Amino acid sequence: MDRMWWHKSVVYQVYPKSFYDSNGDGIGDLGGVISKLDYLEMLGIDILWLSPVYTSPMDDNGYDISDYYAIAPQFGTIDDMDRLIVEAAKRGIAIMMDIVVNHTSDEHPWFIESRSSIHNPKRDWYIWRDGATATLPPNNGESFFTGSAWERDEKTGQYYMHLFSKKQPDLNWKNPEVREEVYRMIRWWLDRGIKGVRLDAIDLISKPEKCINGNEGNNINGMEHWANGPDIDTYLREMNREVFSSYDVVTVGETSFADTKRAVAFTSPESKEMDMIFQFEHMHIDHGGEKGKWERVPLILVKLKSVLSRWQMELYGKGWNSLYWCNHDQPRIVSRFGNDESRYRVQSAKMLAAALHLMQGTPFVYQGEEIGMTNTLFDSIEDYDDIDTLNYYKKAVCEQGIEKEEVLQKIHWASRDNARTPMQWSGAKNGGFTTGVPWLKVNPNYRRINVTNALMDKDSVFYFYRELIRLRRNSPYSDLIAYGDYRQFYENAESVFVYLRTLGDKRILVICSFVKNEVAFTLPGELEGYKVSVILANYPDKKEPVKRMLRPYECVVVELL
Ligand code: TEU
Ligand code: CA
């Protein structure tokens, strides 16, 4: 595979609403992002992925766009956006925009026209169907945000499809005019100087031919029909040809239904579709499955290791992985796969970082992950904001009659708001995020966990991330980390994750303990002859791991010489 610039890049995701508020209205904004660019430069990242900042009624915090060519006033102006692109570039940082084109807002002029009459020229820009009966929607498909995926429109009596909220009607990609408009819009942004594109929910753009019922179950009905529709590859190839092929740009598709085979089809250079994708298999390990995403399932490390290893092996030389633990839709990783109790938080956050960043792929760091931010425990549903969370609460409490306490517990664990509490910059009021009233409560642990503290402590999670980023971008191990092959050891071990990366005669072994008790470790027999030299560790003594007990959440990365 040809080497590409983004093979050694690290991406940092900013969720603008929660990053930094520059004018005291309680909402993070572009001015805030600009003022923190020096911080991001210090961390050493290459690309800044900005969650949507376009004009939007904010039903889903900007993932419901009503004007693709304008910035939401809460976030700033198009001049601020241009300034961000320029200021970031000065610091060697490229901007990646979040492109949401599976759906628009119902307040987008296209949809307003589309719903106005059956004969409107834009009618066919969205997915309209007659009900199955006088009272039933076209099929039993459910939306990702609870309830039917169909909304009946009074005006014409037909239903429109919305795989997410009812304020997010799905575009009809079958219509070539829609595709042309989408491509024009993306080109407009690329011409402004952005260097990356994240394609939201892109595996959902090609809809099934027939409007049949999905399997009933505890999970989302219709899920099996929504993703990877018949024309998915055709559309992606067309978009690549019409847009991306003329620019030096990196693309990443959000594809929650992809398996490794699909991933190769999406990301192999010959396919000419996308550069990499976000897969979700490792995110479904501790929730989801049969019982739906609000049910917690205990983490089984052997399963997690096997999923990650399979993605490493099956994409090797064929496609390209993205590597991520966190984003704005996922609870905080240190609270999930690590341990957020004070005495283990730092160690486990570092261990998770090493486990992920030393695999093959392009790592993504989500704001706050680099200081080990944790889940939050709001005691009232009033404190939550996320539409997915609120819809679920209503259904669970009002329709299913589940105890409020029990529902709140599930929300504590799984709500997307865990990732969306404001960035913790300092121990000052509101974590230094705003001088006003924050739109979402700050996690009360901000006095302890914040950027100011992290920067003052040479053993902080922050500096560990910085070191991992440096190792990948600019160190004697860069080529090995980007292109070395991957092999797992001890795949049946329940507490430790061990893998070897090899390129030519250079090799590193990554050893990570996922548990709070001590666990015995011995260097795999076939590696015994090598001289062991520690290059990174999360305990200050950097003790060699040949045959000894690993301490709680210990990780050691060694070069085998
Ligand atoms: O997410 C789409 C997606 O597949 C899911 O992760 C979804 O967020 C999850 O099932 C809800 O619990 C993308 C965005 O990342 C998300 O923030 C948006 O809400 C969604 O698309 C709609 O645009
Ligand atoms: Ca603001």
Image (cartoon, rainbow, N blue to C red):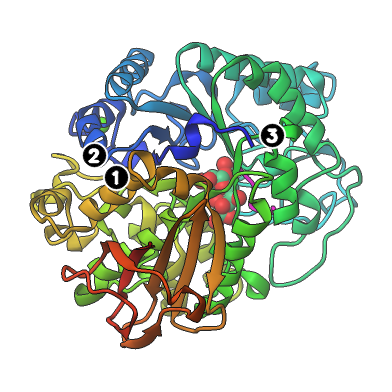
Q: Name the residue under label 1.
A: 439
Give the overall secondary structure of the magenta segment.
loop
Image coords of residue 234 (percent x, y): 81, 31
Q: Which quadrant of the figure contains the N terminus?
A: top right
Task: Give the residue at the far front of this rendering.
Answer: 529
Residue 350 in the image: state x and y as whole percent. 30, 63
> Circle 2 — which element?
loop
Q: Can residue 162 be seen in this view?
A: no
- Is residue 490 part of the magenta span, yes or no? no
Does 386 appear above or below 59? below
Q: Identify the residue position indicated by label 2 in the image.
A: 26
Task: Using the numbered discs, state the Cα–Cα distance from disc 1 to disc 2 in whole angstroms.
Answer: 5 Å
- Identify the disc placed on residue 269: 3
Q: Does the residue labelled 2 lie within 8 Å of ligand 2?
A: yes
Q: Residue 550 carries which label?
A: none
Q: How far apart are marks 3 and 2 (CA)?
A: 44 Å
- In the visual, does 193 lie left or right of 558? right
- What's the distance in space between the residues labelled 3 and 1, CA to CA? 42 Å
Q: Earlier in the sequence, mark 3 or mark 1?
A: 3
Tell whether label 2 touches label 1 (CB within 8 Å): yes
Mark 1 or 2, nearer chain start: 2
Residue 255 among those drawn in magenta: yes
Question: Magenta residues?
Answer: 254-259
Q: Where is residue 81 in the image (x, y as percent from the top left)?
A: 36, 19
Q: Is mark 1 within 8 Å of ligand 2?
A: no
Q: Which residue is rendered at x = 76% and y = 50% of the image?
A: 226
Q: Which amino acid does label 3 sit on?
A: Pro
